[in-house]
Structure formats: structure tokens, C-alpha cells
Image (cartoon, rainbow, N blue to C red):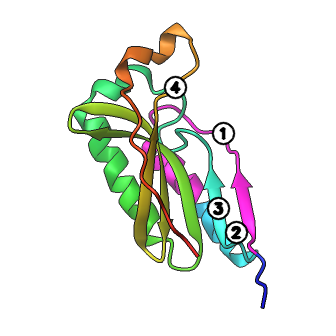
Amino acid sequence: MSRKLSIALAQLNWLVGDIEGNTERMLQTLHEQQKAGADLVMFSELALSGYPPEDLLYRDDFYQRCEAQLDRLQAATQQTAVLVGHPWREEGNLYNALSLFADGKLLGVISNSNYPTTAYLMRNAISLPVMIPVWWS
């Protein structure tokens, strides 16, 4: 028996630093795509924070706001999974990360350190990647 996987790609106009507003746009898109029958909604790199986050990466309250909104996204994934790009801080290291949420759970976080070579991205703020295998069916 075969089953089709319906994936929605959501490239929206994210605003840098508007974490709550960006989350609202994601939740609205997720709701629309749930109605359309999507199994997975994929959001772009740093969709949560907007791109590029620049010096926001060094503010503690920035990560607290990101974590709170990631919790909201996670809770909304009972019917449709979400893949979302966001900044991530772990053990003092900063990452450009991608999280997969499904069934109200975090299935995994994959980190990336490959930023474009432009000065305003503060390339030295990004650490080596950590790879976490994720299984989703």
C-alpha cells in the first residue's frame, strides 16, 4: 500500500526581530495547509527570527522569545508536521538551525554553520554543526 506525502513550501516575507509576528504568519499558513491536506509545512532558513538576525544573536531575551514561539509551533503540529529555520543557542554556541515538529513533539534539531560570506552575518558567531539523525514516518 502506498501513501502520498503532501509537502507545502512556505516562503513568506519574514521580518527581522518580529519573532511573534513571524510565528503568527507561520501558524496561519499551517492552519491553511492543514485544511488543504498537507502532511508537512516547510518554512525557510531563519524564518522564526527573520534574516539576517545580526546582533540580535547576542541578546538573551531574543532566545527566550524564540523558544517561547517554537513551543507554540510545536503545540500546533497535532495534524501537520512543521520544519522551521531558527537561531539556536546551545552551551554558549550559536547555530543556524532547523527543527522538525510533529504530533506536538520535537523530533529533532539540525544545526548548520554555512553562512554566506557577507560581513553583516557575523560569520564568526556561528559554531561547528551538530548533526542529529531524525526519523519520521
Q: Which residue is mark 3?
A: 41
Q: Which residue is mark 4?
A: 52
The answer to whether 13 appears left or right of 21 in the picture is right
Give how far apart the Cα atoms at labels 3 and 2 are: 7 Å
Contact, mark 2 vs mark 1 (Cβ under 8 Å):
no
Label 1 or label 4, whichever comes before in sequence order: 1
- Quadrant of residue 56 within the rendered picture: top left
| Amino acid type assigned to the residue bearing label 2 in the image | Gln
- Residue 54 against residue 104 in the figure, above or below: above
| Amino acid type assigned to the residue bearing label 1 in the image | Asn
Q: Nearer the viewer, mark 3 or mark 2?
A: 3
In the drawing, what numbered circle is on residue 33?
2
* Quadrant location, the C terminus: bottom right
Label 2 or label 1, whichever comes before in sequence order: 1
Residue 117: percent from the left, percent from the top?
56, 13
Residue 41: percent from the left, percent from the top?
64, 62
Q: Residue at x 33, y 31 (%)?
A: 94
Label 1 or label 3, whichever comes before in sequence order: 1
Q: Which residue is mark 1?
A: 13
Magenta span: 5-26
> Which is nearer the eye, 10 or 19?
10
> Which is nearer the eye, 101 or 15?
101
| Magenta stretch contains residue 20 | yes
* Quadrant location, the N terminus: bottom right
Q: What element does badge 4 sit on?
A: loop
